[in-house]
Amino acid sequence: MNELVAGVDLGTTVTKAVLTRPDGTTVAFARNPTTWTQTPGGRLETTGAALVADVLRTLEDAVAQVEDDVQVTGIGIAGLAESGTILDAHGRETSPVIAWFDERGATELKDQGKEFVADFPRRTGLPVGSQWSLPKLLWMRGAGIRLDQTSRWLNMPEYVAYVLTGERVSEPSLASRTGLLDQATGQPWAEALDRIGVGPAFLPETRPAGQPAGRVKQGAFKGAAVTVAGHDHPVAAIGAGATGPADLFDSCGTAEVLLRSVPRILTDDERSTLVALGIDAGRHVLPDHAVLIGGMRSGLVMRRVLALVGADDPARRDELDHRWRPDAPVGDALTVVGAAMHDNDVTLRIRDGASPDLLWAATLAHLGEQTAALLAAVNSVVGEHRTAVAAGGWTRMASVRRAKAGVIPRLRISALEQPGARGAAMFGACAAYDVPLDKVTRQFLDTADQADVTAGAAAASTRKDNS
């Protein structure tokens, strides 16, 4: 019997699963679209049952690629953080799962009063906005969805673990994205709970990533140890090996994230300062660590620009990528409005006569300026990084790699395409074999099935190809 561990990354757009041997050797990978439904009013939501089905189908697709008999011994589940569901006293889901970028709840949060709104960033490490669970819960209560002392809340990776094992747990990095956690104490924020009419048990017992929530009770994966690995971004940093206090992780997806790990809990003043600078400051998947997350909609902007210039198919995109030069004059050919992490609308303003090459150069220049500003904000509080790792689909473009290398010092590009799923598998191995994360990390790094390349080497290769 072939023993394997599984890592799941339940993403907003795609659900991914990787199977590895306990030493980290990758055996199979599968992906499927994540299920959402658009309501007549243009709102986006789903159900917990639909997302559980997505996860199980993707795991089964990965297992189907393995010729030998398979026993999955551990499953780590990471994913989107702010979306979740309410459970009643009988453990049944009683609410829709609202997409994190859906704007429901923005007004309700601002209506909580000047003092509460002012204290929100200091308590939670999050800016005032609609992304978090609390605004959605305020909206649900106003819409007549029942919330009382028997209600419980599970973020979606936690809900998947609950359906598989029957156990309800709260993972700290996910709880940090609810707007219900007092970051200073690591306990539920009583005043926020009062606003939605629930008790302190609304968030279940805390269970750190790597500790088993329970074992799968039935089905193809019966007996596998299940752990909630946590919020996808810090889990991806684990998968990419960027976990030290002086490491910077750049996750290059639709929403680009710059992430730093801090081996202590931040003060209220530090959280307030960081949020004012555009940095979320919450709990890491690593115990007794804080995580700083600065984000922007880089992937969304690049995708829209490529579509505008007719380069959204691979061949034309590669041609545009090949022609890019870091010294191209961009002037005011393109203006981007609203590309920060918490902006739901991104506006592109283009001047007459701007060529596709010029627009692409202007796009990368604009995103480079945003990256530099976020780096400066993080560095002002925790100091400059010593090493930096970038991973994700957009790093496959040479122009993106070289533009990033010009802004982020000491950057190397990881060839890992799915660091989130791999990081979740690492925690799955911890849960299955009761081994510490540092040992698992060494094993997974030793058996990584790809070689990282430095950004400088990538840039040199590109210059040679272009000459």
Image: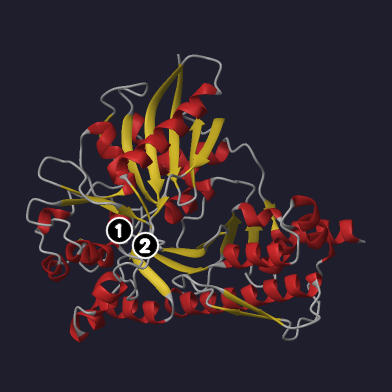
Picture coordinates of residue 466, whole percent (x, y): 89, 60
Q: Residue at label 2? A: 263
- Of all residues shown, which one is farthest toward the front? 40
- Residue 339 location (% of width, % of height): 54, 73
Q: Which quadrant, please, contains the C terminus?
A: bottom right
Q: Amino acid at mark 1?
A: Asp
Residue reaching furthest to the right: 467
Visible residue check, residue 213: no
Relative horizontal placement of residue 47, taking residue 311 as reference (left or right): left
Name the image quarter holding residue 227.
Answer: top left
- Name the residue type under label 2: Pro
Give the mark, 2 or 1, whose residue is nearer the N terminus: 2
In the figure, residue 53 lies in which quadrant?
top left
Tags 2 and 1 in contact by the CB under 8 Å rule?
yes
* Residue sitting at x 29%, y 38%: 161
Label 1 packing within 10 angstroms: few (<14), some (14-19), many (20+): few
Find residue 440 and report its image quarter: top left
Q: Is residue 153 left or right of residue 241?
A: left
- Disc 2 is placed on an element classified as loop
Q: What label sits on residue 227 in the rendered view? A: none
Q: Which mark is residue 288?
A: 1
* Residue at (32, 48) in percent of width and height: 156
| Position of residue 97 in the picture relative to residue 238 (left or right) | left
Distance from the alpha carbon under mark 2 to that under mark 1: 7 Å
Badge 1 element: loop
